[in-house]
Image (spheres, coloured by chain):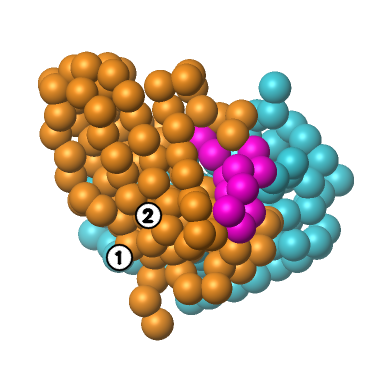
Chain colours: A orange, B cyan
Amino acid sequence: GAGVSQTPSNKVTEKGKYVELRCDPISGHTALYWYRQSLGQGPEFLIYFQGTGAADDSGLPNDRFFAVRPEGSVSTLKIQRTERGDSAMYLCASSLNDGREQYFGPGTRLTVT
Amino acid sequence: ELKVEQNPLFLSMQEGKNYTIYCNYSTTSDRLYWYRQDPGKSLESLFVLLSNGAVKQEGRLMASLDTKARLSTLHITAAVHDLSATYFCAVYTGNQFYFGTGTSLTVIP
């Protein structure tokens, strides 16, 4: 079956612009996670959805970052007023339920110039 | 603050040799995961360890978990070039997965 997909695969934007990153999880997976990975580092937790609700958003670095999952499937990570420090690989993962094996998408590489 | 530490961070080994990567964590958890990441790619799940004493093997890789010591190991047997990648462990607790900093493995022919 289809795995986790993320679009776009690459995004280059100018400092101060708004960006949206999309994640399409595996069908039937209720848990969805967003991570940010900088070069040479492990993935850093951003937010976790269980169904439509954000069960844990404690990893979002500041109020410029926001994520939604309105129908419990596709999720969008939104970043306002982007800064150069936001440049990273953004990874999405889904699992059948919280704490079970995660399946990662291919990631979106965001570059803020 | 929860810490997940891997060592070594960098590992260069010859084909055919054995080695172990260590993952120490600072919280109580009985769920430990190992992932592989190739350069520029996403993470691939290798092992899911869900109880104390769990041991899983796949090909030349074997992972184990000691929840009392808060330690997991990833053992490589008779390394081959195809195993060159970065390996991450991750601990699950409190709705979150906490990842280690990764071990970059290079297998030299």
Q: Which residue is mark 1?
A: B82
Q: Position of residue A56 (x, y in %)?
A: 64, 38
User: Residues in magenta?
Assistant: A45-56
Any mark on residue A23, and which? 2
Is residue A96 visible in the rendered image? The answer is yes
In the image, residue A48 lies in the stretch drawn in magenta: yes
Vertical comparison of B4 with B31: above or below: above
Residue type at numbered disc 1: Asp
Residue at screen point 33% across, 62% down: A5
Q: Position of residue B33 (x, y in %)?
A: 61, 55
- Label 1: which secondary element: helix
Please state which of residues B47 and B64 is positioned toward the viewer in this rendering.
B47
Residue at screen point 77% across, 35% down: B27
Query: Disc 1 is attached to a residue of which chain?
Result: B
Q: Position of residue A32 (x, y in %)?
A: 53, 54
- Cα–Cα span, label 1 and label 2: 29 Å
Please state which of residues B81 and A101 is positioned toward the viewer in this rendering.
A101
Vertical comparison of A44 with B31: above or below: above
Number of the front mark, 1 or 2: 2
In the picture, the quarter occupied by the N terminus of chain B is top right
